Amino acid sequence: MSTLIYWFRNDLRLTDNPAFTLASQQALQHGLRLLPVFCHAPPETTRWGFARVGLHRQRVLADTLLDLETQLRSLGSAPLHLHGQPANVLPALARVLQASTVMAEDIAAPQEQGEVAGLRAAGLTVQTVWQSSLLDPAELPFEVTALPAVFTQFRTGVEKAAVQVRQPLPAPSTVAPLPAMWDADSDRISHPDLAQLLTSNWPLAPTNKGQEAMNIDALDRVSLPYHLPAFQGGERTGLAHLRRYLAAKLPHSYKATRNQLSGTDYSSKFSPWLASGALSAPTIYAELKAFEVEFGANDGSYWLWFELLWRDYFRFLHLQTNDTLTLWRQGQTGVPLVDAAMRELHQTGYLSNRLRQVVASHLIYDLGCDWRAGAAWFESQLVDFDIYSNQGNWLYIAGLGTDPRGGRRFDVAKQTRDHDPDGSYQRLWLQG
């Protein structure tokens, strides 16, 4: 019997998890085994010398994963904890299981997209489901590629179009069985090819619930006491906190108190559960609307919707950037000079200095993308790549370097008239 791998990412919940629900349904319908997996990234130090994931985040993640594991075990399943980068450990796992398909949530961020690309490059079929936003991108009153550049315009457009939030899904009542090679004695898959990939320190002992990470002197002053049972990570605690917050009618005072600096109730504190995916935005919204029906709506409860929309807007900006960056890289922006230049770069690994400035300016100022993504593409392609010159020039164009004018925005139409008036360069690279 074949196995479907479900890769938990930032969706560490069972309630309203469309990707996991779909994986469960497909496995049951097709008689497949289902193996939930979480990949623990190796400790990483940033270039500035501190840990990328500090003790606070580690503690909350551990509590969240323990809660998820408890819920899965109640359904006769269990997550396999792997140690390493997904692009390395998931293909190795798939080979052992003779599996070919991985399902996961879609995350529109460069590193996360790169992880999926790595799995596909290893020959796996990866099915991703977009699910982290309140609103469905397909239901927006504009294409994501045409997302308004100002949040107020985005909010006004969404509210005027009365875009509906989907109803949250219940947690699956049944989960397909674990792979046959799951060893009940060791409570994991025992296989020599996986010995180096399985985490050796899981489950993590929930010692002191975060007190080892938090300064002891801060325990009585903390605004988010994640070391206490009522605020620790995990879906069940998140749902309980959401309902406690609503039962206390705190949404009515949210707008008035949200800018305070200290305390547990001046703001919603939904963010840690949203960040790990222990709570979904549609779940919060559905509970909030039920609250408004029972107790009435005011500026405070509206402002919670307002903040959830901000959260969506940042996600859709990443979707827009990913789409736009791809079009720029492929020379399909619709701007002839830019497209010709990007095709020359991709096909030959070289570009004139003038065109490097033009396409960089177009990416930053006309397409609204992150200069660092463009700098990374140049690094990938240029045969004369030099780290100092590349970073320096991109910073210069972006207005973050030595330019006293605060950035250089090139008028592409003028550049075309000045440097390719007869269109010969454009024809050279755009034909065929």
Image (spheres, rainbow, N blue to C red):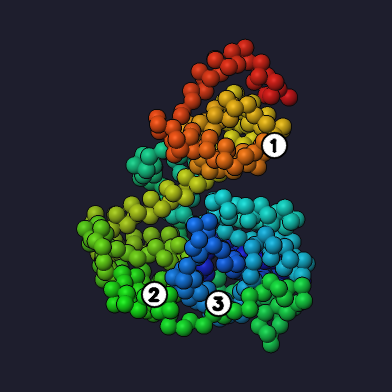
- Name above or below for residue 421 compared with residue 369: above
Residue 349: give x, y in percent of width and height: 69, 34
Q: Does residue 308 show up?
A: yes
Q: In this view, does 71 lie to the left or right of 92?
A: left
Q: In this view, does 284 lie to the left or right of 256?
A: right
> For the view shown, which residue lies furthest in the top direction?
422
Q: In which quarter of the image is residue 360?
A: top right
Closest to the camera, between mark 3 and mark 1, is 1
Closest to the camera, between mark 3 and mark 2, is 2
Residue plotted at (64% across, 20% down): 426
Residue plotted at (74% across, 66% down): 92
**In the rendering, which numbered label is found on residue 69?**
3
Q: Name the residue under label 1.
A: 383
- Of mark 1 and mark 2, the one earlier in the sequence is 2
Q: Does residue 398 show up?
A: no
**In the rendering, which numbered label is found on residue 371?**
none
Residue 228: give x, y in percent of width and height: 37, 79
- Name above or below for residue 298 compared with residue 218: above
Residue plotted at (65% across, 19% down): 425
Cα distance, mark 3 to mark 2?
A: 25 Å
Query: Looking at the rendering, in which quadrant would you find the C terminus?
Result: top right
Q: Residues within 10 Å of mark 3 (few under 14, many from 20)?
A: many
In the structure shown, which secondary structural element does the residue marked by tag 2 occupy? loop
Q: Is residue 96 left or right of residue 46?
A: right
Q: Mark 2 points at which residue?
A: 214
Residue 167: give x, y in percent of width and height: 45, 59
Indicate the amino acid at tag 1.
Val
Cα distance, mark 1 to mark 2?
A: 48 Å
- Name above or below for residue 14 compared with residue 359: below
